[in-house]
Amino acid sequence: MRLHVQRWQLENGAVFLFSEKRDGAGMVFVGSLPLGSAREPTELAGIAHFTAELLDRGTDGKTRQQIAEELESVGASLGFSAGAEAVTFSAVCLPEQAPLVLRNAADCLEGAIFPEEELEKARGEILTALRQREDDPRAMSEEKLRQVVYPAGHPYSRTPLGTRETVEKIGRQDIVQFRDCVYSPQGMIIAAAGDLDPTEAVEAVSAALGAWAKPSGVGSMHIPDPHDISGGTHAVPMMHKAQADLSIGLPALRRTDDDFYALDVANLILGRLGLMGRLGRRVRDEQGLAYYATSVLERARGRGLWMAKAGVNPADVERALEAVISEVRRLREEGLEAGELDDARSHLVGSLVLRLETNHGIAGALHEIEYYNLGIDFFDRYADILGLVTAETLVGTAAKYLDPDKMTTVVAGPWSG
Amino acid sequence: MTAMGGQLCDEVIEAALDNGVKVLMKPQHRSPIVTCWACYRVGSRNDPQGRTGSSHWTEHMLFKGTARWGKGEIPRELSKRGGYFNGFTSEDETVYFETLPSEHLDLALDIESDMMMNALFDAEEFEAERTVIIAEREGAENQPLYLLAEQVRATAYDIHPYRVPIIGWKCDLRAISREELLEHYRTFYAPNNCTLVLVGDFDPDRTLERAHSYFGSAPRQAPPAEPRAEEPAQSGERRVLVKKPGTASYVIAAFHAPKASHEETAALLVADAILGGARGIGMGGSAHLGITSRLYRALVETKLAVSAGCFFRLSVDPGLIMIFATVRQGVQSDQVEQALRKELMNLAEKPVEEAELEKARRQIEAQWAYSLDGVTGQAYGLSLADRLESCRLLDELRSKALQVGRDEVAQVARKYLHADNMTIGHFIPS
């Protein structure tokens, strides 16, 4: 199945990719700008996220409710959020509403006015969200892992929400200054799929987002390489909880590194293929220790995490940890089982058609290929790219990047060590 | 306003095998993908007392080996062909589905038929799965909102099995025997208790033949007994307090609602959209709406809560319409409850403005369009509709909802969303 993709560079340098899909399911837009927490000073941790939360809460001439009413009265949605690397926006609408949604997106990005009242509402929401995270073993397990394996101040070391201390003290002037200094259309990517003629789509995007003409913001996104560490085992005791959530991992590699595809296939075999790969088979299926036991290889511009995760009864923590580590070692030392590489490759190639079926899937995929500069014909080449991954290169990348002796373990929940 | 855009049931071909398997087929050739759903009319409402969680546990066991597919082979064979698969159990049904490249449809039919007829329930696998399910339950227990919702449902119902959690109570999960579960499987996994739903790139005539060849040998069985419990009308407000360590407060208000096929369901769907924003059919693809909804404006904009929403689950028997709110730090949950009561009274006492009603209609229409993106979403809708009454039910509800008038919304709000029909729950962090 070939996906027909068109790509344009807009007047202000932003890039727009589009795939037409005429089936009455509406339109999906996804976009990003490199304005995430990597651009924020540590003493104002959370300001990138806070700013993104406020973008649609008032512009010149429209209150938050007026913006929302304009969109929701026609069944359209528009949302902004911020991660470590980027502010992202996404919109869903019927095709005839695309110009309206895009105009609102542009107004919010360029002209948000951050009313004091909205700022206080959003502050309370973020603080409550931080408190909820503190009571969530799965969230705390991953958060602690990041704090340990990435150096202090590294954008991947912390949640983009910030901390209670920093969010309490961020003021309106800080947010205005952050937006004025950092926000610009430089690096903006917009991807869309759905029920529009490509000419109409690019005209609507150009008129709204392509017209944003502001010089580049101050600074740029820099994701430093973390140093490798041997992080040990850490507990986040939450003795009132029923289950312990484990995170075991370390910084791995960049999405654009040459080794990515081999490690991605290794991760698939280790913690995802079938019912959660080898980890699921050993921890859940054979030993009945967990409902979920899986692994993740983050896609990031810097060295993202590789992480194994499981939720287990506190009495089974040691057994589960031993099982995860021994499966990682087994892959490194004993290599692949018969047929595993072929199965993994054919899964990735075969499932591409599923990924590219819906507007959400297509828009997300188009955004990814532009964000990582993979080329507009990436999906045509994907099978060939995977064909270059051999058993030797796969095991080699596992040996290079998944050293259990360098992994950090965090257990959050009713377990104190 | 009349319905625009396609009906879910457009071009659906209805058929039945001789042994009672119902087959719903919706050929579409936009993408070389097909989705195959086996939907059994058994859910937690059918779990016997003392064996709660049986339907859900049975679902787990069907992936653990059948006569033709050894342990682990089903996920492996589907994955390596690029397929996505899953199963889920609700109060009303248990569903198994695969979405995969269309050339592998036979594999899906093969697997589903063997799961229907020949699941092994190996004794060792059964015991290993006990702890997996308890782990699943304990993961849910880590979430305060889950704990509160479970208690609210258990309190809202006196006798109907909707009061019991789908995953089951832990004491039952520790005690259920393999023989008891096998009996559950043999009772409910009959061909005449199953609907096959297929959407996507396939030839219906050939596929029906293949369905005959795979499923045709399953013997028809006596229809399983339906639960007999009829929940008596609630005659006074009920309160639930859950006090556990935590860091945030939550409020849930639940109201008894009619079953999906009831004549007032469409009006309640509109009320639901006005209260919390319209939602999609249920398998993703939808827009996040609700910032201009009544609950958001009454609870979040006023800085009483940080989130608020409404959920009316369409069900076989009379269900619940539930309102959720996460209390803002520094606010007492009682304040959220008072504001919620006031908002529901407003809805009951004053007919909604025409503009608000029109917004609800447009949201319902838009969410409908988004939900139909992709074969999996469509199959979900068809399987749900078929379980509730017929594959046309969601289409009919959508049409009716677009015709609901202002007075009807106030009428159903008065009839259902009042204090004597309410169970109100608070999670109080201790």
Image: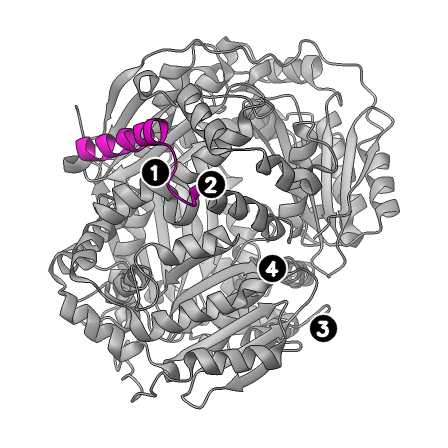
Q: Nearer the viewer, mark 3 or mark 1?
A: 3
- Amino acid carrying label 3: it is Thr
Identify the magenta region. Answer: A317-340
Q: Is residue A154 left or right of residue A315?
A: right
The answer to which of A284 and A332 lies nearer the viewer is A332
The answer to which of B158 and A60 lies nearer the viewer is B158
The answer to which of A140 and B258 lies nearer the viewer is A140
Q: Are marks 3 and 1 on the same chain?
A: yes
> Taking B158 as reference, is A240 above or below it?
above
Q: Is residue B187 magenta?
A: no
Q: Which of disc 4 and disc 3 is earlier in sequence? A: 3
The residue indicated by pointer 2 is: A341
> Taking A73 as reference, is A210 above or below it?
above
- Amino acid carrying label 4: it is Ser
Q: Nearer the viewer, mark 2 or mark 3?
A: 2
Within 10 Å of disc 2 (Cα), the crowding (few <14, some 14-19, many 20+) is: many
- Amino acid carrying label 1: it is Gln
The residue indicated by pointer 3 is: B2
Q: Nearer the viewer, mark 3 or mark 4?
A: 4
Question: What residue sits 66% from the left and 61% below the top?
Answer: B369
Q: Are marks 2 and 3 on the same chain?
A: no
Label for residue B332?
A: 1
Within 10 Å of disc 1 (Cα), the crowding (few <14, some 14-19, many 20+) is: some
